[in-house]
Amino acid sequence: MQQITLNYVESAPMLLLWVASQRPGKHLLVECDPGGFEALAAQAETLCAPPVRRCRVPGPLQLPADRQGTLLIDDVAALGIDEQIALFDWLGCPGSDLRVISGTTSPMAPLLASGKFLEGLFNRLGNVQFDVTSRECAR
């Protein structure tokens, strides 16, 4: 797992490069300020492998049956445990050319430490991680 922790100004060009690279199975997890995933999703819709689908969380977890293209998940930290298990299992199915770009407005470390977010799912979603919040980033 590669973690990149830079502020938004420094990381935006690198983040967009990772978004534009067509690497199925290399999922991105992006920590951003509230509303920040909207701008990233707009870029991803034009740069990523089609079909590009969006799952707006909080809300129903909608996972495409064909596992092709790109799936954007707005706020994975808002997923309930049942949804996290379903997403973990769905990502583990073979024969997928899918790439997931997920966002979170919550730091993941406290959620992992408290057991509110599954470590296995975090590891699957966070092949590459970006912290594009405006605050100072911890290493």
Image: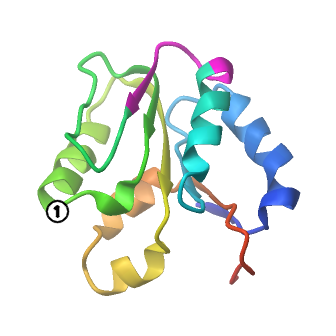
Left or right: 4, with 24 as reference point: right
Q: Magenta stretch: residue 48 in it?
A: yes
Return the residue nearer the eye: 55 or 24.
55
Work out whether 109 lies above or below 75. Answer: below
User: Which quadrant: the C terminus?
Assistant: bottom right
Quadrant for the N terminus in the image: bottom right
Residue 106, above or below 8: below
Q: Is residue 131 magenta?
A: no
- Is 137 situated above or below 26? below
Image position, residue 69 (x, y; %) = 47, 19
Residue 130: name its quadrant: bottom right
Badge 1 local density, few (<14 within 10 Å), some, or many (20+)? few
Region of the chain picked out in magenta, as a range: 46-54
- Residue name at image x 25 percent, y 80 percent: 115
- Identify residue for label 1: 81
Disc 1 element: helix
The residue type indicated by label 1 comes to Ile
